[in-house]
Image (spheres, helix red, strand yellow):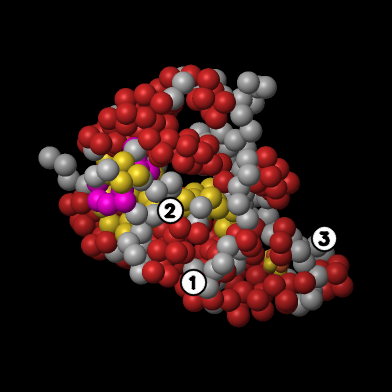
Amino acid sequence: MNDKQPNIDPWGSELVGEKDYQRIIEEFGIEQVEDLDIPASFFEDNQFFRRKLIIGHRGFETILKAIKLQKPWAIMSGIKPSGKFHLGTLMTAKEMVELQNQGGFVYYSIADIESYVDHGMTYETALEIAQDNIADIIALGLDVNRAYIWLQSKEKLVKEMVFEAGRYVTLAMMKAIYGERRFGLYNCALVQVGDILLPQLKEEVMPTVVPVGLDQDPHLRLVRDLSKYFKRDGVDLIKPASTYHKLLPSLTDITKKMSKSISGSSFYFDQPEEEISKIILRTYTGGRRNKKEQQELGGEPDKCMIYQILKIYFEPDDTKLGEVFQKCINGELMCGDHKRECAEKVLDFVKNHIKKKERAIDIARQLLNFD
Ligand code: SF4
């Protein structure tokens, strides 16, 4: 990244590790989760907060207040269609479903304009991919009766935001937030402003939360700044809130970013079982050089991708996760055995997911049928 670029790139972040996270949190004034007054019942229902996978937020107190007062609130999320669902795309979808279970109404954007601008993908291809992705999200538990899903290219209010929000934005502002970019990407950022404000523009003025990886903060800074210019029925919109999770590193190297182009860095849910199994067995661990050292010193679960994926996705039981941590640091768990156990868990999840997805694909096609 050259010196004209900002510290966070929402279209290709290289952020990995605690040092990067702390620097970004401090530099951009992201708020601490510890400063929120979160009721115990919220923690119980939300694995991402409970397990400290959320590392910062902006304005999340508006959502907690709406929950407390039993007022409507929205979860805004979306996907840029680019390929099949994989381990890296799972986290935001699971967060969204969990928040929906806590009472929020889901607004979900299919960013087909961004797929076209960023990757040259046709709208037809983006739609096909999106239908497949939505089937994955339904399989993960999305209640489609409490969700509104749209394509950017078909949603008038969202597309018009390029001109509406564009009235208040200068090139200098965009460069300060995103660095020097193709103009199409600046336009996409303004379309995203439309996505994020859509729950309030379309439905009613209400708190909205956008659960994202830390690398997406530039979009949130832009929309939070611009929201003050918009009203609905004469009422000012509420500044959208956000939560930030850590970005999942590569399965093969905890210091590198997960990348679809690096073999073994992640896996797709529709990959053959043997391939998924092999990837898990090759995953980077926090284990010692040999059995003797592992028994004497214990492993380092905080540096281990096996432990990370269990914590984020595949071990829902806190007690069992705690036991894994203890056994690992006590040197009672060997990495080879543990990887095999983890592979079984992952394959169980994947088999179950595929069955649910097969049942969901027709629903996804109907939902995304815009003919
Ligand atoms: S025993 Fe398990 S959790 Fe501990 S370092 Fe090895 S693979 Fe990771």
Residue mark closest to the camera, 2 vs 3: 2
> In the displayed structure, would residue 133 be above or below residue 312?
above
Along the viewing direction, whichever of 118 and 87 lies nearer the viewer: 118
* Tally of numbered tags: 3
Along the viewing direction, whichever of 82 and 278 lies nearer the viewer: 82
Task: Tell me the quarter of the picture where residue 187 sits.
Answer: top left
Residue 301 in the image: state x and y as whole percent: 71, 65
- Mark closer to the chain start, 1 or 3: 1
**Residue depicted at x 57% and y 46%:** 214
User: Which residue is labeled 3 in the image?
Assistant: 289
Overall secondary structure of the magenta section: helix
> In the displayed structure, would residue 105 be above or below residue 39?
above
Residue 244 in the image: state x and y as whole percent: 55, 51
Cα–Cα span, label 2 and label 3? 44 Å
Residue mark closest to the camera, 1 vs 3: 1
In this view, the residue farthest toward the left is 371
| Amino acid type of the residue tagged 2 in the rendering | Val
Asked if the magenta segment contains residue 204, the reply would be yes
> In the displayed structure, would residue 291 be above or below residue 190?
below
Which residues, given as a range, are shown in magenta? 194-205
**Residue depicted at x 77% and y 67%:** 299
Residue 81 visible? The answer is: no
- Mark closer to the chain start, 2 or 3: 2
User: Which residue is labeled 2 in the image?
Assistant: 209
Asked whether, in this view, residue 165 is left or right of residue 15, the answer is left
Q: Are marks 1 and 3 in contact (CB under 8 Å)?
A: no
Q: Are marks 2 and 1 in contact (CB under 8 Å)?
A: no
**Residue depicted at x 57% and y 58%:** 54
- Mark closer to the chain start, 2 or 1: 1
